[in-house]
Image (cartoon, rainbow, N blue to C red):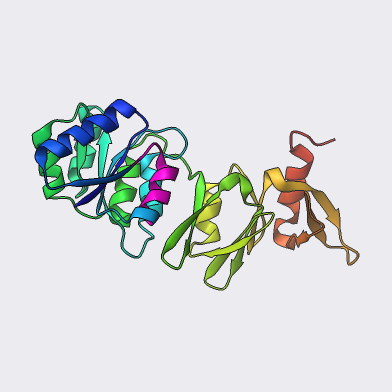
């Protein structure tokens, strides 16, 4: 079995390497120090199983697992965690295994033996054990079996396009299978709904102005592109523009 170790602490990664060597039959094909690296190295190395920490700087293990689930053949994921027993009880209900730090050899061997793939439902249930599940820090784009991670601050707007949503950055556009409703719910503090088919990053809005035809439009930074504001959302968009921190 090919294993990728994901942990931001070198001592923890070394410990897992030693345990896997003692158990035998497992090939450590690489290491990663955060969720971003975990996704990138999974696409590159194609491991069978990830031993992944949950709390890591940047992208954590839960978000990384969400991105990995979109792969055509996602790896098994076994979480490593320092959660207390009350939180671990919630994990026990799910078919996803975990390892409580400090990790014991026999516990690791058992977890690897019964490793199962994460399902979307299981990951949602795990997320619900968190008091405040964090929003994603990246949007995952799936390209011919590979994963491209787009940092959320780079996203200028989301635009509904048939059954897909277009993710637009300053230089690129990608299609994802998601809904504006879900994206708006997750990123409500960073994106503004201006139309039934459009969410715009507040950080990328230069201002709002009227078009020659008298309708409202959102002007974006670093581009001449304008996005139409629907009549339904015009009042809320104008109110947001008046109350934004840097409003004149």
Residue 100 makes an appearance in the image: no
Residue 177 makes an appearance in the image: yes
Of residues 122 and 73, which is closer to you in this image? 73
Q: Answer whether residue 36 is magenta in the image.
A: yes
Query: Is residue 80 shown above or below 213?
Result: above
- The image quarter containing residue 190 is top right
Q: Name the residue: 78% across, 50% down.
A: 222
Question: Horizontal and vertical percent for residue 176?
Answer: 51, 63
Q: Name the residue: 41% across, 42% down.
A: 35
Query: Is residue 68 shown above or below 88?
Result: below
| Tag count | 0
Q: Which residues are magenta?
A: 31-43
Q: Name the residue: 31% across, 58% down.
A: 74
Residue most extreme to the bottom: 162
Question: Horizontal and vertical percent for residue 147?
Answer: 45, 58
Of residues 92 and 3, which is closer to you in this image? 3
- Image side of residue 165 versus residue 15, left or right: right
- Classified by dominant secondary structure, the portion drawn in magenta counts as helix
Question: Horizontal and vertical percent for residue 211?
Answer: 87, 62
- The image quarter containing residue 16 is top left
Q: Answer whether residue 74 is magenta in the image.
A: no
Q: Name the residue: 63% across, 64% down.
A: 197
């Amino acid at each position: 079995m090919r294993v990728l170790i994901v942990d931001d602490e070198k001592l923890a990664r070394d410990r897992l390497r030693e345990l896997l060597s003692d158990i035998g039959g497992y090939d450590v094909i690489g290491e990663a120090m955060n969720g971003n690296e975990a996704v990138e190295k999974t696409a590159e190395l194609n491991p069978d199983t990830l031993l992944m920490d949950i709390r890591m700087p940047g992208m954590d293990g839960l978000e990384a697992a969400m991105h990995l689930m979109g792969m055509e053949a996602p790896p098994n994921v076994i979480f490593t965690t320092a959660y207390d027993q009350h939180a671990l009880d919630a994990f026990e209900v799910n078919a996803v295994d975990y390892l409580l730090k400090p990790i014991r050899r026999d516990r690791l061997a058992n977890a690897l033996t019964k490793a199962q793939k994460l399902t979307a439902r299981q990951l949602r249930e795990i997320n619900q054990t968190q008091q405040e599940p964090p929003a994603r820090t990246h949007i995952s784009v799936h390209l011919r079996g590979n994963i491209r991670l787009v940092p959320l601050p780079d996203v200028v707007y989301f635009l509904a396009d048939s059954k897909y949503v277009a993710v637009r950055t300053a230089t690129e556009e990608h299609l994802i299978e998601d809904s504006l409703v879900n994206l708006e719910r997750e990123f409500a503090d960073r994106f503004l709904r201006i139309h039934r088919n459009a969410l715009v990053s507040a950080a990328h809005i230069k201002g709002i102005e009227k078009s020659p035809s008298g309708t409202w439009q959102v002007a974006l930074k670093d581009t001449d592109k304008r996005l139409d504001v629907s009549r339904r959302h015009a009042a809320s968009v104008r109110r947001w523009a008046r109350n934004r921190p840097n409003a004149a």
